[in-house]
Image (spheres, helix red, strand yellow):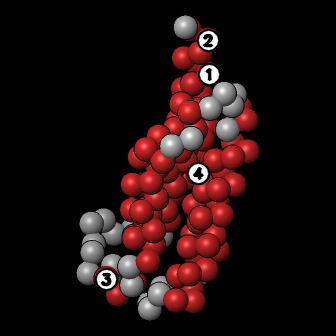
Amino acid sequence: MKIKNFNKTIILTFIVIILSTVPGSSFNSVNWYDFPNKDKLGHFLMYLVLAYYFSIELLNISEIKVKNIKFIALPIIITLGGILEIVQGTLIPFRSCDFFDFLSNTAGASFGFVIFAFRNLKYRQTS
C-alpha cells in the first residue's frame, strides 16, 4: 500500500485539520450565510467528503468488499473527528469541544460512506 494511493484523502485530511485548528476568532469575520448552527453543516460536509474519498481510495487498493470498508474507514474518520474536537477544546484559542460538532462529523462520515456504498454497489451490479 503506497501513500500516493491516498492523495485525495491526505489532502482532504489536511484541509479538515487546518480548518479545525484555526483559532475561533478567525471565523467571526466570515459570514457567508446567517442561520443557526451553520458550523454543523460545515462539519457534516467536510466529513462526508473525507469519508467518501477515503472509502473510494481504500476500495481501489484492496480486495476488501464494499460493505466491509465501513469497518476501516468510519472508525478512522470518526476517531479523527473526536481527536480534533478534544484538541479544539484544550489547545485552540476561542474554540471549544462541542459534542454536537462531533455528532455532525460522525453523521457526515456515515452519510459519505452510504453514498460511496450505493454508488459502488450499483456500479458493480451493472458491470
- Find residue 97 and report its horizontal and vertical position in percent: 59, 81
| Neighbours of disc 3 within 10 Å: few (<14), some (14-19), many (20+) | few
The tag earlier along the polypeptide, 4 or 3, is 3
What's the residue at 39%, 70% (across, down)?
19
Q: Amino acid at mark 3?
A: Ser
Look at 27% across and 66% down and name the residue there.
32
Residue 43 is left or right of residue 31, and the answer is right
Q: Are marks 1 and 4 in contact (CB under 8 Å)?
A: no
Query: Disc 1 to disc 4, how far (Cα)?
Result: 18 Å
Q: What is the distance, in whole Å, between disc 3 and disc 2 at their CAs?
A: 47 Å
Residue that numbered label 1 is attached to: 121
Of callouts 3 and 1, the N-terminal one: 3
18 lies left or right of 122? left
Residue placed under numbered mark 3 in the picture: 26
The tag earlier along the polypeptide, 1 or 4, is: 4
Residue 4 placed where, x, y %? 43, 44
* Relative to 58, residue 100 above or below: below
Q: Quadrant of residue 21?
A: bottom left
Hey, what amino acid is under mark 1?
A: Leu
Q: Residue at x 69, y 54 (%)?
A: 75
SS at mark 3 in the image: helix
Return the residue at label 4: 109
**Who comes first in sequence, dot 4 or dot 2?**
4
Tell me, for residue 125, which label it has, or none: 2
Identify the element where label 2 is drawn.
helix
* Placement of the C terminus among the 4 image quadrants: top right
Question: Is residue 54 positioned above or below 78 on the image?
Answer: above
Q: Percent from the top left, x then y, of residue 56?
A: 52, 35
Q: Looking at the image, do the residues carrying marks 3 and 2 touch, with CB atoms under 8 Å apart?
A: no
Asked whether residue 115 is in view, the answer is no
